[in-house]
Amino acid sequence: MTSSHPTRIAARFASLAAEGRPGLVTFITAGDPDGVTSLDILKALPGAGADLIEVGVPFTDPMADGPAIQAAGLRALKAGQTLAKTLAMVAQFRAGDAATPVILMGYYNPIYVYGVDRFLADARAAGVDGLIIVDLPPEEDEELCLPALKAGLDFIRLATPTTDDKRLPAVLRHTAGFVYYVSITGITGAATPDAGRVSQAVARIKQHTDLPVAVGFGVKTPEQAAAIAAGADAVVVGSALVEAVRASLDETGAATPRTVSDVVQLVQGLAAAVRGVARAA
């Protein structure tokens, strides 16, 4: 099943395929370290080389996230970030960028509290293209997945090293946009993925679906990104970017003139490495 409208995600992966190269997916936490700086980073990502963007929705209990993204979420929440402000941030970004796909990544609780129908309408109006909700398994598709698809939003699921061939069809049944393969077992940013094993896993997933496969969790350097991208349709980098934000802050935790530029510089290096990967025709 796919969403009921063509999405920017499908268009971007089609463009990447036509160019014969893998894509770079970047993750930032909305509102980290503050709303203004976070929006400036978001606006700068496409020009730095990001092909798709994941925007993390801060949550008080981010069970799948490692220390870097947990800390980013706490900084954002302390600065007053909310789901409504995150949607407004996407809308502001979308006013100047009609092409780059934006995916919201997070947990179901803030959406449930906001109201599913209201959230889907507001997300669609803001220019959100897809959702990655890490704590909703396929058995609960009626909660958000199916309504999201009906509303025209891609619902992207995670496959992991422990997702075997028996489980994979259930995971993929209503997935749209792309499949997010978690390259390590555990939380974000906790270990470095093995490129050979990742390539084998992506090939196995592709036996079950025609969707692109993006690989994330643990990719931190341009060299790692290039190695992973060689066996995937896209590589996702998150914790490294969030850590670049943290490292740029002053002693009070406030943004500095380096904050945006440090993230941009890292993305430029990642993009150059990923774009240097040749893909078989």
Image: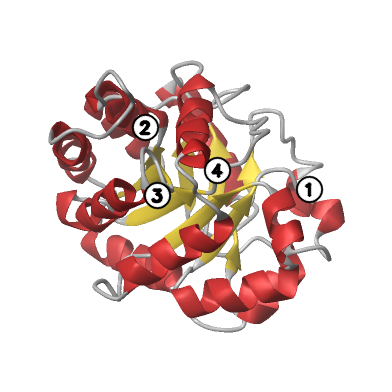
Q: Amino acid at mark 4?
A: Pro
Eyeballing the image, is 141 above or below 206? below
Q: In the picture provided, is 120 more to the left or to the right than 278?
A: right
Amino acid residing under circle 2: Val
Secondary structure under the numbered disc 2 in the rendered image: helix
Label 2 or label 1, whichever comes before in sequence order: 1
Give the residue number, with chain letter if any, for mark 2.
Answer: 242
Q: Which residue is mark 4?
A: 58
Q: Earlier in the sequence, mark 2 or mark 3?
A: 3
| Residue that numbered label 3 is attached to | 233
Regarding residue 212, the answer to whether it shows in the image is yes
Q: Nearer the viewer, residue 49 or 159?
A: 49
Q: Quadrant of residue 75?
A: top left
Coloration of the structure image: secondary structure
Q: Amino acid at mark 1?
A: Pro
Identify whether 225 is placed above or below 51: above
Q: Determine crowd level at label 4: few under 14, some 14-19, many 20+ residues with C-alpha closer than 10 A.
A: many
How many tags in the picture?
4
Quarter that holds the C terminus: bottom left
Q: Position of residue 163 (x, y in %)?
A: 72, 35
Write down the quadrant of residue 153 in the picture. bottom right
Residue beneath the point at 59% across and 24% down: 187
